[in-house]
Amino acid sequence: MDKPSAMPVDFRHPLQRTPFHERARALSQVDSFVPWSGYSTVDVFTTVEQEYFAVRNAATLYDLTPMVKYRIVGREAVPYLNRLITRDVTKLKVNRVAYCVWCNDAGHLVDDGTLFRSGESEYLLCTAERQIDWLLSSADGFEVEVAEITEQVAALALQGPTSCSVLKALGLAGIENLKPFEIGRFTFAGAPLSVSRTGFTGDLGYELWITPDSALTLWDALMTAGRSWGIRPIGSQALNMVRIEAGFILPNVDFVSAEHTIRTGRDRSPLEMGLGWLVDFDKGHFTGRRALLEEQRRGVARMLVGLDIAGNKPARDSLLYAAPTAKREIGSVTSAMWSPTCKRNIALAMVEAPHFKTGTRLWVDIYLNRELVWERRMCQALVVDRPFFAPERRRATPAADY
Amino acid sequence: MVGAGHNGLVAACYLARGGLKVLVLERQPFIGGAAVSRQLYKDFTYSNCSYVCSLLRPEIMRTLELPKHGLQIIPYEGGCTMMQNGDHLAIYDHHDSLRREIARHSKRDAEAYDRFSRDVMRQCKFIKPLLMREPPDPTSFKPRDIRELLYLGQRFHGLGEQRMYDTLRFWTMSAADFLDEYFESEIVKAHMAGSSIIGTALGPRSPGTAYVLLHHYMGDIDDTVGAWGFARGGMGSITQALGKSLQASGGAIRVDAPVARIRVRGGVATGVVLEDGEEIAARLVVSNLDVRRTFLNTMDPNDLPGEFLRQVKNFKIRGSSGKLNIALDGLPVFPAIPTGAPCTRGDMHVTDSIEMMERAYDDWKDGRWSRAPYIDMLIPTQIDPTMTPNGKHYMSVFVQYCPYELADGGWTDEKRKAFGATVIDTIARHSPNFKDLILHAEIRTPWDIENEVGLTEGNIFQGELTMDQLLFNRPIPGYAQYRSPVPGLYMCGSSTHPGGGVMGAPGANAARAVLRDAGRAALV
């Protein structure tokens, strides 16, 4: 148990500031900040549209610091993680990264995150929601230490087709040869800098990890190095657009953690989230395995799918029907947008069996506000595979210049 | 209607609206029972008994138009526990401030708090719809009981496997065991355990106290579940609004009209006899008094079945709480709390471990007031501008534990003063200027509460909220549906389901039962 800290909480500032806050504040033109995981972060710097296109066309900086980070170290780190996580952690090599999920005994999703193997028995787990209670409970019986280190690491996402060029201009030798999900170790201004070829945009991109005292220097150097490569900071709104195109899910948007659901039937399994590929039944026991095996045998009751919807009006919060006149809902949209890059009206939706098979035609109930007069549209939609956007450049190694 | 407490008034309102001719008789010269605002010192208004509001059912406020009759409920923010070592635990409204504050004491507890809240919310979601329903009798084959049992069963089943197990555990286990399943930090547990002992003659380690904790969470303010607030103008505003609502629907109230006896003729209730001998005939008599007072003090034992009478005598309704109402010349300072922190506008405590709480209970068992009592202390005038002259304050201090009878005999003025001094000294240890600010203090022991309000032994819930006295066993097995063994006589106080707290649900449920027997449509 921790020793009580003498410093009382500053109740006048419920939200913390990231090490990049000073720069973000200066560059924010519209004063649009939102809370994220206890930090005040930028929602929009200038305009969402310009920020969005910068991700798909040039290079962007996004402050990742509020992402919750845990250091997991110990002789039994591998068996611990292999029990916790549904993927086979033994296959993850040093300096590699894996997207992963973990479940409770009932096979319901607790959270998703990215697991960085930083050493033989040292890992960094990045999660959207706080997990220490779950991670420590799961550590019973393992020789492993788990500690939250969110405040000890400053993190930036550098994403977009010119992001590799920016890093080359920054002087990171050989960065173009870094493979997807690989971690590179560099020294920047005398400080150790880790760069992983990972991201939440589905595009070419990197995530940079450094100590907080070097954060502003790194930001400034990136902005300078990227000037001719069209770099600009982006806020959460633009990121949300590109993550939908990439088909990535968000807790409390596309699913609610089983640790937080109050109503029965609101928990989701990785199979239902379309993340069955992250579940390895052959690796031995892991938390939730029995329940997930049973669910696989029985077949899932619902599935998160991609939708391609007629028209160009985003189907936000829409209900789904099997026929335009049907009374009973067969699901609902969790995330939706018009995709400016794909030129498609796309959505992520939770759909009941048997309507979730790729190629199924559904109907989406969309409400339109036309100068304060609401109109209802029943639009046809097609169940499609995710991701909606997956350019070659995201995987190509060596990475292209643009 | 015997007694103008909040449940009596709620029931009376519904009965009047249902078309019955209603007369409410109140022993005191004022209405309100345990929901009163009184001026005992200059122009300072006290919430003399109950002092905060959360459980009052929104459907009652709405259907009885209480806002129109002057009721305003204002939520308060946060709360805190001041520790022996000068540190504190503050509860903040903002989730991130709260997380960081709990993390000061234990990082793990800061996150376990979310799990705790989730499980409490899950149970509250199950319990809430049962509040405004008559508990079904599991031994009955009446279609209504079978239907209600099915409803209860369906809701229970709807909880899902794990939560069904949890329900039975949470309803029977001790608060200390319950909190141990979530928290490691003593101070966090101590703060959370407070509501498990309030008004209860049990310690945090006694089985059954986890339910008392849940009982305090199942209210809401404007759909914020578990939130507590102040009634603007004190808790008397609730009963004043009910009184006006009653009068607006044609009901009448007589104060200074103590009922001596409920009259039974030919085995049927036929009215009441007042202490001055006046007889008032009535087709139906509803008692807002607790079950012990109703059947043991205002009825002829010969009119009641012997077995029933024996169970009434055994009904657990023990006095365990005292109350201080204090007029203050200014705002006391609490050095443990950061200056300006909003948590002093909520409930403040000074018990920083479960152990300390349990020791306080030990004193009660030994027949004396706790030497280091658990206190639930609020200064509503930081939010409510109507209760004191500007710049002055009113402090409400609820005290756990204080026995109804002391080991060395009954209460005397001297002992009452000593009890008050114990509480004041307890607060003064955490507030250097507190004693100098005191202009007047009303000190109330369980004995005083019984004598003034009429609650047996001064038990604030009209009977312990333990599993043996809940649902179809409250107050007496077989008599949980507001009807007494005597036709024409009903019960509507907190002794009945779903129990105490200024909730109004017993009153509303009782009115529904009365109206159904009278062949009238139910209104809520």
Image (spheres, rainbow, N blue to C red):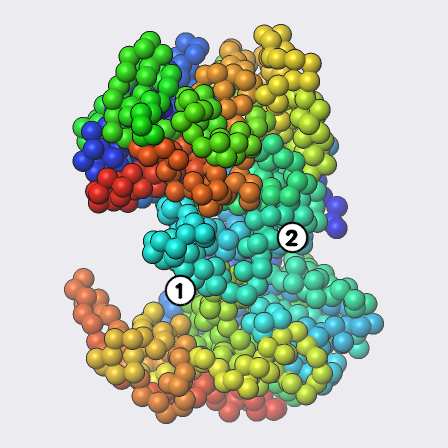
The residue to which callout 1 is attached is: A46
Q: Residue at x 28, y 16 (%)?
A: B279
Left-right relation of B146 to A63? left
Pick the quarter of the image with the C terminus of chain B. top left
Q: Which residue is mark 2?
A: B182
Q: Is B154 in front, or is A385?
A: B154
Q: Is residue A60 left or right of residue B429?
A: left
Picture coordinates of residue B428, whole percent (x, y): 64, 20
SS of the residue at dot 2? loop
For this orientation, the residue located farthest to the front is B266
Q: Is residue A359 above or below residue B220?
A: below
Residue B452, quarter of picture:
top left
**Residue at image x 70%, y 85%?**
A283
SS of the residue at dot 1? loop
Answer whether labels 1 and 2 touch (C-beta < 8 Å): no
Front label number (1 vs 2): 2
Q: Measuring from the top left, give residue B317's x and y in whole percent.
A: 54, 30
Q: Is residue B409 left or right of residue A34?
A: right
Q: Which quadrant of the structure image shows residue B200?
A: top right
